[in-house]
Amino acid sequence: MRRLISLLMMSLLLAACAGRQPRALVELPPLRLSPASLGTTLALQQQLQFTFGSHQRALDALLEVDDRQVRLAVQAMGQTGVRMQWDGTTLTQQRAPWLPPQVRAERVLDDLQFALWPTAAIAAALPAGWQVDDDGRQRTLRRNGTTWLRLQRHADGSLELENRAEGYALRIESADMSTQEP
């Protein structure tokens, strides 16, 4: 789940790097879940591989979540592109001037929460007409029977997020920094 959050962030960066992003087929609902509703703390270092059309980009991310705040930093070629903080009420971001405008902190936060937060918390935040399903290996977000967002959990621990509404995919590989020795 932790890897998925980074995957979501990186997918947005990939879409932005690919150039002008086409109009989304459907607007995905915002989640805006509280950090505490994750139910655990996270400290992850992630490698992200974004695919948008025929374009691919690799990014690195650092993700920290505790009961009060979600913090995410995404880097490309050793430079920080975006820093994001969410306290359950306010979403703030610091962006590098070179970061494409298509990379939106709101979408990154929603992708992270879709990937990592408990299914019940996601379901409670969805507006009428939207459904989330999770069988342990795959999580889907559907509207009127159509899957618009899909998360696949692989046996090696990596995650793949496919955003069909905005046309990108993200593969996330994570390392838990809280268990690493100094």
Image (tube, helix red, strand yellow):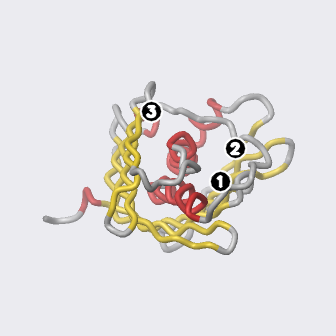
Residue that carries the numbered disc 1 in the rendered image:
139
In the visual, does 167 lie left or right of 2?
right
Secondary structure under tag 3 reads strand
How far apart in space, not on screen, are marks 1 and 3 (Cα)? 25 Å
Task: Please identify the residue farthest to the left as the structure is shown.
Answer: 182
Residue 52's image quarter?
A: bottom right
N-term-proximal mark, 2 vs 3: 3
Q: Position of residue 156 (x, y in %)?
A: 49, 74
Q: Residue at x 66, y 61 (%)?
A: 168
Q: Which mark's residue is nearer the viewer, 2 or 3?
A: 3
Q: Residue at x 60, y 60 (%)?
A: 15
**Mark 2 surroundings within 10 Å by alpha-carbon count, few (fewer than 14), some (14 through 19), many (20 or more):** some
> Mark 2 and 3 residues: CB-CB less than 8 Å, in contact?
no
Q: Does the CB distance between marks 1 and 2 fall below 8 Å?
A: yes
- Amino acid type, callout 1: Arg
Numbered disc 2: secondary structure: strand
Q: Nearer the viewer, mark 1 or mark 3?
A: 3
Amino acid at circle 2: Val
